[in-house]
Image: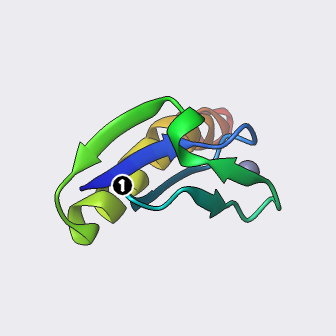
Amino acid sequence: MYLIFRCDCGRTMYSKEEVARKKCVCGKNLKVKERRILAKTDNAESASQMVRKFQEEKYGGLQFTTADRI
Ligand SMILES: [Zn+2]
């Protein structure tokens, strides 16, 4: 299984369930088991799609607001 979770910096990422730690691009070393799990998938491909979906939910709205103002 793959777990989808979020770093304190707001970035969504995924890792294999048996991986204990995952390093975020912000430099923070996350303990996977201590994160709140947003979703689970059974393969890496759908995990990365899920991450993209969560990222769009977080940042997509902001981009829309900006475009709307222009
Ligand atoms: Zn981070």
The x, y position of residue 56, in whole percent, is 46, 46
The x, y position of residue 32, in whole percent, is 54, 46
SS class, disc 1: loop
Q: Is residue 9 left or right of residue 62?
A: right
The x, y position of residue 24, in whole percent, is 69, 60
The x, y position of residue 65, in whole percent, is 61, 32
Viewer-closest of 17 and 3: 17
Viewer-closest of 48 and 4: 4
Q: Residue furthest bottom?
A: 45
Q: Residue at x 67, y 39 (%)?
A: 66
Q: Residue at x 35, y 64 (%)?
A: 48
Quadrant of image for the N terminus: bottom left
Report which residue position mark 1 lands on: 17
Quadrant of image for the C terminus: top right
Q: Residues within 10 Å of mark 1 (few under 14, many from 20)?
A: some
Residue 45, by quadrant, is bottom left
Going by the numbered disc 1, the residue's amino acid type is Glu
